[in-house]
Image (tube, helix red, strand yellow):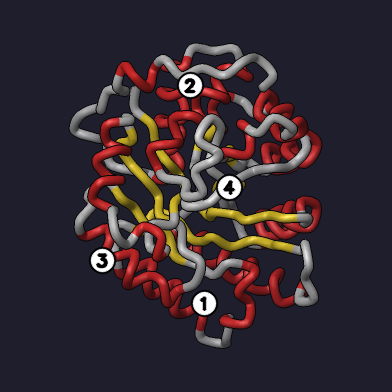
Amino acid sequence: MPLVDTHVHLNFDTFAGDLDELAQAWRQAGVLALVHSCVEPSDFPAMQAIANGIPELYLSVGLHPLDMDKWSSTTAAQIAELAASDRRVVAIGETGLDFFKADDEAAQRDAFWQQLTIAYNLGLPVIVHCRDAAQATAEVIEAFQRQVGPVTGVMHCWAGAPAETQLFLDLGFYISFSGIVTFKNAHQVKASAQLVPANRLLVETDCPFLSPEPRRKERRNQPAFVYHVAACLAELRQVEFEALAQTTTHNAFTLFKLPEPSSLLPVPSDLRCASFPAGS
């Protein structure tokens, strides 16, 4: 069954030596599209260079909330220009709010608002990073939708509680789960994964971070491992893996307006046999 990894960072040095082999692995695992998230605009040329050799790789551009020291009076214009310059750009971000150890909350809110504005003007979704800031993030999005206009996107690598999850569902956002949902003690994430309606569900690796069970001992995550995220979600939601894969793939193509694939890649039989105990 086909899968889409909706959040990768393939420009990191850890992938420099064997990206061709990793691409072969994710294709064999059924991954037919990937969205490469951007941490800061200066990363964009390297992302483009990688995408030049990987036709199924799509791009985003934005500034991560933990990189506010790189935000300047020209950053918004730079992001908008880069986004409009390449047809492979399917989203703005990752942007959002991270208040875990923040002393720049006002600056984060301003940068987030400006990136929402870019997304609105270009008709693109946003990829939202949210850590210890669910209420504030929802408030910014709600205010933007009320004052400016409709904007949608995805809460990526979601680790929030069900009540926080509902905030973003009510705003029309998609929710994407990473390897965190496979972790034994990720109880609130598992509860959120059961709450999200099927038509708002996405999967990702956030590679090279957060390798899922049963590959958690491998320090470097990779796109092929999104299969394990999807398998865990299928188990949690008590649906067939094939249905979960088809649904999340359809959702990814819908949100990011990806072109329809010419063919669907099968999942090899040796991967289909992987399973997760209920409540794992």
**Considering the numbered disc 1 on the image, is that residue within a helix, a strand or a loop?**
helix
Nearer to us: label 4 or label 3: 3
Task: Indicate the secondary structure of the residue bearing disc 4.
Answer: loop
For marks 4 and 3, give the CA distance.
24 Å
Distance CA(mark 1)–CA(mark 3): 22 Å
Mark 3 vs mark 2: which is more N-terminal?
A: 3
Instruction: Kindly identify which numbered label has been placed on residue 76.
Output: 1
Residue flagged by tag 4: what amino acid is it? His
Front in this rendered view, residue 169 or 44: 44
Quadrant showing the C terminus: top right
Q: Is residue 253 visible?
A: no
Residue in the picture at 50% in, 23% down: 231
Q: Residue 183, how many percent across, how many down?
A: 65, 33
Q: Residue at x 31, y 23 (%)?
A: 267
Circle 3: residue type: Ala
Image coordinates for residue 141, horizontal then vertical, percent: 68, 55
Report the disc number at residue 244.
2
Measure the C-alpha gap from mark 3 to mark 2.
Answer: 32 Å
What distance separates the C-alpha of mark 1 from that of mark 4? 21 Å
> Which callout, 2 or 1, points at the residue further toward the start of the chain?
1
Marker disc for residue 156: 4
Hey, what amino acid is under mark 2? Leu
> Which corner quadrant of the image does residue 107 belong to?
bottom right
Residue that appears at 70% across and 38% down? 170
Which of these two is toward me, 15 or 43? 15
Q: Verify CB contact (< 8 Å) between mark 4 and mark 3.
A: no
- Front: mark 1 or 4: 4
Name the residue that disc number 3 marks. 49
- The amino acid type of the residue labelled 1 equals Ala
The residues tagged by marks 4 and 2 sit, at their Cα atoms, a distance apart of: 18 Å
